[in-house]
Image (spheres, rainbow, N blue to C red):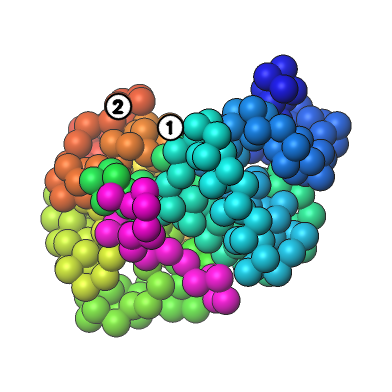
Amino acid sequence: GGAGAAALVLLPEGQPGTDSQEQAAELESDAYFLDEISKDPVAAEAALRSSFGLMRFAFVLLRAHPRREAIKRYDALLRNLEAKDLRRFHETAQYFALQMVHAAVAAGRDIQSFAALCRFNPELTSEGYIFWHYTAETLAKGTKEFIPPDVAPLPDVISVPTATWHPDLTDDAFLAAVRGGTLQKWSVPVVVRLSFLLLRLGRRAGMKELLGQVRQLGARHHTVVANETLAFFTMHMVHFHALCAGADAGSFPEFAEKCGVVLDPLLYRGYYSDLLIFSPEARQGLVAPDVCPLPDVLPSSTKPKS
């Protein structure tokens, strides 16, 4: 039981899709994972103590059964573990894991394995992913019953919007939509584009307007990008990469082609932990990184060339 349980986790947190992980996925199928946790409570406890394990369990059930039946089997096994004093039941965390997996599956790709799902959705591998949607205080209240998120709503399984910087809009139209409060579907790529365009005002003035727009967004909607530290980080990285690549002038599509790395919604993980960047302090103010310092932007380049 114990030795077999340790082998059940295929993808280490935060490192989806490497060759060694793909080889492990080939050697140990999702069907074997489900079989092991179904017949061995000790193996199940070891595999399902993490959010990652819960999501894998949800995935294999949703692949095999309609949603209602999958939820029934999901809850039954988890309640059985609690009855055996092997694991605390947590209604909200467990529902969150299932909902996020189902939303990712419903996004349109023909995903056959959990390893493949994680390659397309690397955020699923983060133990801090739940804090994109919940504060720790609210999550602590959700052990016995489901508590709605207080940071950002959970995605709709039927319709999952993709992150976009709205390439259908010109830079001027995009900026006008932001300033007019009419832009739909905010995401990290939207903050990247807004940062790039506002840097034309100079870094200080641009940062002031960016943070103001983020505060206004937070007053209108619960969304993960209504986060002042994440916005500051995003503009800093846009500024840094634009200067390094000589892409600080021109249009945003030109910048995105040269510096696409900044569009990665998980770029912050090289500098901030999930727990810190989605904390109340980070959402409502500026906090320093706890993983790695931000790269320097040369003092002589405080305003991009025009």
Find the residue positioned furthest to the front.
Answer: 83
Q: Tell me the amino acid under the disc marked 2.
A: Asp
Residue beneath label 2, please? 290
Q: Residue at x 43, y 53 (%)?
A: 91
Closer to the N terminus: mark 1 or mark 2? 1
Disc 2 residue crowd, few under 14, some 14–19, many 20+, Cα 10 Å? some
Point 71% across, 32% down: residue:
40
Visible in this render: residue 266? no
Residue that sits furthest to the right in the current view? 27
Q: Nearer the viewer, residue 3 or 197?
A: 3
Quadrant housing residue 149: bottom left
Q: CA distance from mark 1 to mark 2?
A: 10 Å
Residue at the spot 28% in from the left edge and 65% down from the top edge: 222
Q: Is residue 13 magenta?
A: no
- x and y percentages locating residue 226 in the rendered image: 26, 59
Residue 20 at least partly seen: yes
Element at badge 1? Answer: helix
Residue 149 higher or lower than 31, as above or below: below
142 is within the stretch colored magenta = yes
Front residue of this view, candidates 110 and 196: 110
Q: Amino acid at mark 1?
A: Gly
The residue that disc 1 covers is 270
Quadrant occupied by the C terminus: bottom left
**Residue 198's x, y, as percent?**
25, 60
Identify the image quadrant of residue 13. Answer: top right
Please give the range of residues in magenta: 141-160
Q: Residues within 10 Å of mark 1 (few under 14, many from 20)?
A: few
Q: Quick check: 184 left or right of 8?
A: left
Pinpoint residue 58: horizontal percent, then vertical percent. Answer: 63, 52
Question: Residue shown at 55%/76% (left/top)?
Answer: 159
